[in-house]
Image (cartoon, rainbow, N blue to C red):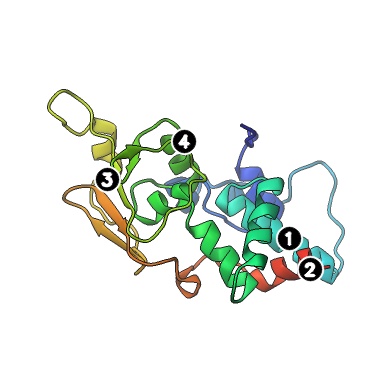
Amino acid sequence: MARYKDAVCRKCRRIGEKLFLKGERCYTPRCGVERRRRPPGESVPRRRRPSDWALQLREKQKTRFMYGVLERQFRRYFDMAREGSGATGDNLMQVLESRLDNVVYRLSFVDSRQQGRQLVNHGHFYVNGSRMDIPSYLVNPGDVITWKRGGENGSTPEFIQDLTDGLPKRPVPSWLRLDPANLTGEVVTPPIPSEVDSGIEIRLVVEFYSK
């Protein structure tokens, strides 16, 4: 399975803004964007007005980086969104938000989507009682996401207790329902694009692929 293996802070520096790819670290002075505001590389960028295509490309890359999706898969998501009914941009955001690694992030079970991807990949989450280790799995309304319980008596491992202490850490969108006591979450409705607070101008992404 292909995945990005370089430092994720380079993505934020390339885009020029925080994408919050490393959870709590992004809110501290250790954030890569705070420490080194220049784009990665040795060359000094020239100051010039970006073209429309450059703005569209930047927004597409920003969206990919935020959700941890490679180009081929992202293009497949766009094709799915374009074939569906309704606005292509809204459909695309629904697909991205429906990814399991994003859902566990939205439920505050993890500190970042990257961490969610890793824990899902290691089999720490169940969907409707079945172990699910595919981060790109698309959830549906009615799906119930639970943590894997360890130990003979079903006790919660210490690292899970540390991650889930003080739930919810972030506002949980209305299309999800969180049960902090039982460490479970339920998908109530399809994702609502208007609730996505990522700062993505999805219109530019649609324009990029529509040429």
Q: Which residue is located at x 23 percent, y 28 percent? A: 150
* Residue 67 point in image, percent of width and height: 56, 52
The label on residue 164 is 3
Q: Which residue is located at x 50 percent, y 71 percent? A: 193
* Residue 63 point in image, percent of width and height: 63, 58
Which of disc 2 and disc 4 is earlier in sequence? Answer: 4
- Is residue 189 shown left or right of residue 48? left
Q: Spatial distance from mark 4 to mark 2, Cα to Cα?
A: 33 Å
Which of disc 1 and disc 3 is earlier in sequence? Answer: 1
Secondary structure of residue under mark 4: helix
Work out whether residue 95 can be spotted.
yes
Viewer-closest of 173 and 24: 173
Task: Give the crowd class for mark 1: few <14, some 14-19, many >=20 residues within 10 Å.
Answer: some
Q: Spatial distance from mark 3 to mark 1, Cα to Cα?
A: 34 Å
* Residue 77 point in image, percent of width and height: 63, 56
**Foreground label between 4 and 1:** 4
Q: Spatial distance from mark 3 to mark 4, Cα to Cα?
A: 16 Å
The label on residue 210 is 2
- The amino acid sitting under disc 1 is Arg
- The amino acid sitting under disc 2 is Ser
* Residue 185 point in image, percent of width and height: 29, 54
- The amino acid sitting under disc 3 is Thr
Viewer-closest of 142 and 20: 142
Viewer-closest of 22 and 144: 144
Residue identified by numbered label 4:
118
**Which quadrant would the C terminus be assigned to in this image?**
bottom right
Task: Give the crowd class for mark 4: few <14, some 14-19, many >=20 residues within 10 Å.
Answer: some
Residue identified by numbered label 1:
58
Secondary structure of residue under mark 2: loop
